[in-house]
Image (cartoon, grey):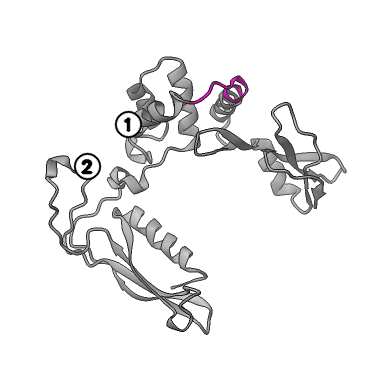
Amino acid sequence: MNFDSLHLAQDFYANYAKKVGFVTKVRNTNFDMMRKEAKIPVNQSLHCTREGYRESRVKVATRANRIIATRCRARMYVMLDREKECWVVSRLELRHFHPCSAKKAVHYHEYRELTMHAKCVITDNDEAGIRPNKTYLALANDVDGSSNLSFLEKDVRNYITSNLRYSDDNEDFQGMMTYFVRIKEINPNFFYAIDVDDANKFRSALWVYARCRALYEYYRDVVSFDTTYKRNMHGLSFASFVGVNHHGITLFITPVQLTSKCTGSSK
């Protein structure tokens, strides 16, 4: 196999590891010796995190989320092909010296992640006084079991403690989130995504109605990205993707709320 960049090779092996049930790490990276200052990588080895063997001096009782080394030799080597200008897999070892389980991969910290929909449900349920374990069970039932979730009940509790308890109240933001969750429950084809900063402050939002997604399949030849709308009371720019049907009628493909300073329109 070959990849256009080293990052794509890393993502491929990480996605493969998640499906199989283990965690990867970058074991070694060699750089171009002819151009040391540029630090251009020429090859890299990606290993299973349970490779090698080491004894920790820390007592077992004080260590959390331990990953025990078992001399596992599962790994992938990639190198830069200068002629083809791509990254090539030069060596691959698939056999593990320990059992792997894709269903248990969610227990690894590297793979645990709350989806935006889950965060909205947790927020609404917390405001309604619903206990975290009940919220977790409800989210698990929506996807036919907790094994299909990408997080644990512990992550739900941590999100409530670290994010919701210390976030500022914003009625408009909460109203928007409630609306998104309600529309998502009515029509699963509705899509939305929220961007927040490190302090959990709202920055931008994007949403697409199911009807807009269907219209895009028919009238996507020409799409205009219009950002000429004035900023609202929150100082956020409103932009939309607009198309035209065969009757010459303007159609909203998807609206998007932006915070960046963008003006004019592009086609």
Percent coordinates x, y for residue 111 in the rendering: 36, 47
Left or right: residue 210 versus residue 169 is: right
Q: Residue at (50%, 74%) from the top-left corner?
A: 38
The location of residue 160, given as percent across then percent down, is: 40, 26
Residue in the picture at 30% in, 46% down: 108
Residue 173 sits inside the magenta stretch = yes
Going by the image, does 86 lie left or right of 260? left
Residue at point 63%, 22% (across, down): 172
What kind of residue is marked 2?
Ala
Q: Mark 2 = which residue?
A: 64
**Which amino acid is tagged 1?**
Glu
Q: Residue at x 26, y 58 (%)?
A: 49
Whether 219 is among the magenta residues is no
Secondary structure at numbered mark 2: loop
- Residue 241 location, quadrant: top right
Q: Earlier in the sequence, mark 2 or mark 1?
A: 2
Specify start and end residues of the magenta stretch as a single range: 167-175
Mark nearest the camera among 2 and 1 is 2
Considering the numbered disc 1 on the image, is that residue within a helix, a strand or a loop?
A: helix
Front in this rendered view, residue 143 or 200: 200
Q: Is residue 138 above or below residue 236?
A: above
The reply to whether residue 29 is in sight is yes
Q: Which residue is labeled 1 in the image?
A: 153
